[in-house]
Image (cartoon, helix red, strand yellow):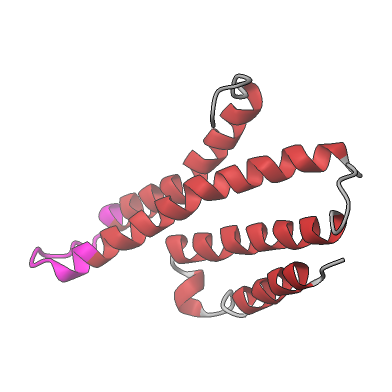
Amino acid sequence: MAVEPAALSFVSVVLLGVFIPVKRVRTSVPSLAILLWLIGCNLVHGINALIWAGNLNVHVPVWCDIVTKLVLGANVALPGAFLCISRHLELISSKRKIETDLKTTRNRTLLDFLFCYIIPVIYMALRVWFPPLPGVPN
């Protein structure tokens, strides 16, 4: 019975959780999304490592469905969050004038929220309603 994968996952959850109170992370939608999605995935993988350590018995059938959708959402959300951070870095490094009026800031935040949370949730919901066909790769 290997406990190391579970321990590493839970240590990762704690180390990532340390950064949540930091103001720079809390006020940035993409940075907070990266932290939350990584914490969720590490927590799920740690629990999976504990539940299925040394056996293949299905203890909670619904758990597999929930975890699969969460990991699929993270697979969409993390690239979206990194795309948002890349957009911010491109805006900062370009020679264009950075607009700081309320409308531009609001639109930028809404776009970040869309890429980091709304699109992944829509993807997870679509995977519940329209599961992949048997024999067809995901």
Image quadrant containing the C terminus: top right
> Which quadrant of the rendered structure holds the N terminus?
bottom right
Which residue appears at 70% of the width and 77% of the height? Answer: 11
Identified at 64% across, 74% down, the residue is 17
From the viewer's perspective, tell me whether residue 91 is left or right of residue 129.
left
Q: Examine the image and state in which quarter residue 4 appears.
A: bottom right
The quadrant where residue 127 appears: top right
Q: Residue furthest left?
A: 95
What is the x, y in percent for residue 24? 45, 77
Front residue of 120/60: it is 60
Would residue 130 appear left or right of 107 to someone viewing this image? right
Specify whether residue 91 is painted magenta: yes
Q: Is residue 103 left or right of residue 129?
A: left
| Residue 97 image position (x, y, % from top left) | 11, 65
Nearer the observer, 49 or 88: 49
Residue in the image at 70% along x and 69% along y = 9
116 up-or-down from 135: above or below: below
Above or below, 119 relative to 81: above
User: Is residue 137 on the magenta stretch?
Assistant: no
How many numbered circles does the render carry? 0
Residue 88, quarter of picture: bottom left
Q: Position of residue 107 (x, y in %)?
A: 32, 49
Which residues are drawn in magenta?
A: 90-104
Asked if 131 appears above or below 87 in the picture, the reply is above
Across and down, in percent, residue 22 comes to 53, 80
Which of these two is toward me, 107 or 137?
137
* Residue at x 56% of width, y 78% of height: 19
